[in-house]
Image (cartoon, rainbow, N blue to C red):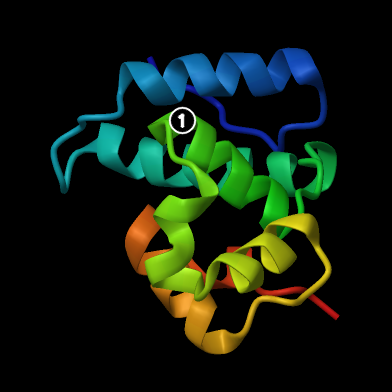
Amino acid sequence: MKTLIKVIKTEAAYQKAIKRTLAIFHAEEGTPQADELALLLVLVKDYEDKHIHLPEISPIEVIKLKMEERGLKAKDLESIIGTKGHTSSILSGRREITLKMAKRLKDFFHLPPEIFLPTR
């Protein structure tokens, strides 16, 4: 029996599409299920782009969250950010993160560098 795939317009349809996507997620390439999965992924992404809005989080909040997750103190970031005073200024938001710091933070926390750079 063929499944009719439609544009996702409601939360209920979205949940149904997610459930089906998970059910066929490991479909073998070249099968009808793989084609269905590819289509579902496009439709789910389209719905999410239009209806799901993630809150913006500042780079400082990301750093503090990651520090908390790892049990780190400000002094643990001095080798990445700089002196004790410089690290304190960054964590308090008095100074901006430089491109060099963003790269080091990216490597240290294994996150995309753009997370640490302000969007303007």
Q: Is residue 5 above or below residue 62?
A: above
Report crowding for label 1: few under 14, some 14 to 19, many 20 or more residues within 10 A (C-alpha).
few
Residue 21 in view (yes/no) = yes
From this view, report whether residue 7 is shown above or below residue 99: above
Query: What is the count of numbered marks?
Result: 1
Q: Quadrant of the C terminus?
A: bottom right
In front of the other: 117 or 5? 117
Quarter of the N terminus within the rendering: top left
* As drawn, 63 above or below 43: below
Residue 8, given in percent of the width and then of the height, sits at 72, 32
Return the x and y of residue 11 as percentages of the image width and height: 78, 19
Q: Residue 108: x, y in percent?
A: 35, 60
Q: Is residue 85 left or right of residue 56?
A: left
The reply, left or right, for residue 85 in relation to residue 105 is right
Residue, x 56% and y 87% (percent of image)? 99
Looking at this view, is 60 or 114 the one in front? Answer: 60
Residue shown at 30%/29% (left/top)?
25
Q: Quadrant of residue 13?
A: top right
> Does residue 110 show up?
no
Q: In the structure shown, which secondary structural element does the residue marked by tag 1 occupy?
A: helix
Q: Which residue is mark 1?
A: 69
Residue 29 sits above or below residue 95 on the image: above
For this rendering, which residue is in front, 95 or 118? 95
Task: Please tell me which residue is depicted at 53% across the width and 50% down the height of the picture.
Answer: 74
Residue 26 in which image quadrant? top left
* Amino acid on which the number 1 mark rests in the picture: Glu
State left or right for residue 72 relative to residue 28.
right
Residue at figure coordinates x 15%, y 46% from the top left: 29
- The reply, left or right, for residue 25 in relation to residue 118 is left
